[in-house]
Amino acid sequence: MRKGVRLINCARGGIYNEAALVEGLKSGHLGGVALDVYENEPPSNCPLFGMPNVLCTPHLGASTEEAQSNVALEAAELLIDFFTTGAIRQSVNMAPLDPKTLEGLRGYLDLSYRLGLFLAQVDRAMPVACKLRYRGEICKKDTRLLSAAFAAGLLEHAMESPVNIVNAEVLLKERGIELVEERTSDVGDFSSMITAEVVSEDRTAMASGTLFGNNMPRLVQKSDCRLESYLDGTLLVFHHRDMPGVIGQVGNIFGRHQINIAQMSVGRGTNQPGGAAIGVLALDATPPAEALAEMLSVPGVTSATIVKLPPAGALPPWLRA
């Protein structure tokens, strides 16, 4: 800085190094210092006290008459907005979405959130990057919010503190996980589709979803396999060889253990039998460990994973407004 500069800090203590300020004042390089925040508060032995060309005041913050009036007026305006239009502004614990934006995006926000929850459980490797591809009419929406909802789902069970679309991207970035978006307005098999990829050091987990109607999220692709599955409740995802008898044996195992299969979807990577396939079962209860052990002993079954998702229609707190 040029000689004679005057420094003011009324933001947070510690932004300026107080010892460096003292040195600059003594050498004459600093023309003056004004502070109302300090490295240690309340300040008891700040070395700047009593020095020439130094102005120190208590940490006043919003203690002026004008600031108090403005804070009271803003608080009243925030409440009026909420009770008259439902708009939530400047909230610290939920998404600041206006009602119109929320209503137009709620179904897809729920879909993105559930895709994040799903991929976090089917592939538990530590991610290094996430890629979200938006295709079709969804590209006209605010996809940044959708990406944040996906991140919230991906991190929900990995964090002790609450995760929402306000802090999810920041939490990803703090952990060195890159979040990338791609958009194409070309319509594919569905009017809108979201494809999520979670990249770890040695593999990539992928899932695609769409919205049936206004509020029915569906899984329509896992890895290279196309299928159509619910995205709610207790799911069992299993990889197997596409060969006769596998599905029947799996059904018999759950029947013996009194586990009802509410819905089943099976997809294979090619149109030819015998290759790799993926099955997703929507179950009415969590199967016991014995049932999973029996399932893994079926010839052709290579893996089985339980995924717990919210019930149909259940929304996270930050999406209920």
Image (tube, grey):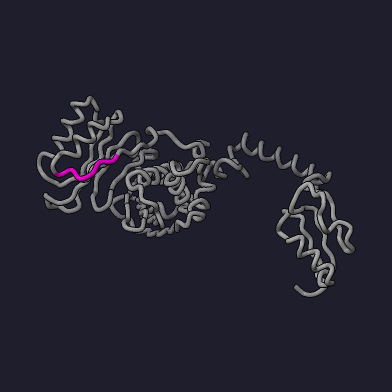
Foreground pick, 24 / 109: 24
- Which x, y percent locates residue 116? 40, 46
Does residue 303 belong to the magenta stretch?
Answer: yes
**Measuring 54% from the left and 47% from the top, which residue is drawn there?**
166
Please tell me whether residue 25 is drawn above or below residue 211 in the rendered image.
Answer: below
Q: In which quarter of the image is residue 68?
A: top right
Q: In this view, does 295 lie to the left or right of 152?
A: left
**x and y percentages locating residue 188 in the rendered image:** 30, 55
109 in the magenta segment? no
Provide residue 30's location: percent of width, then percent of height. 82, 69
Which residue ends up furthest to the bottom in the rendered image? 2
Looking at this rendering, what residue extends furthest in the top direction? 258
Residue 241 at what x, y percent from top left? 15, 47
In which quarter of the view is residue 239 placed?
A: top left
Measuring 75% from the left and 50% from the top, which residue is drawn there?
A: 40
Outermost left residue: 244
Residue at screen point 57% across, 44% down: 96
Is residue 18 shown left or right of residue 290? right
Quadrant holding the N terminus: bottom right
Image side of residue 29 versus residue 195, left or right: right
The foreground one among 172 and 267 is: 172
Left or right of 158, for residue 166: right
The stretch in magenta equals 300-305
Q: How many numbered discs?
A: 0
**Residue at screen point 23% across, 40% down:** 265
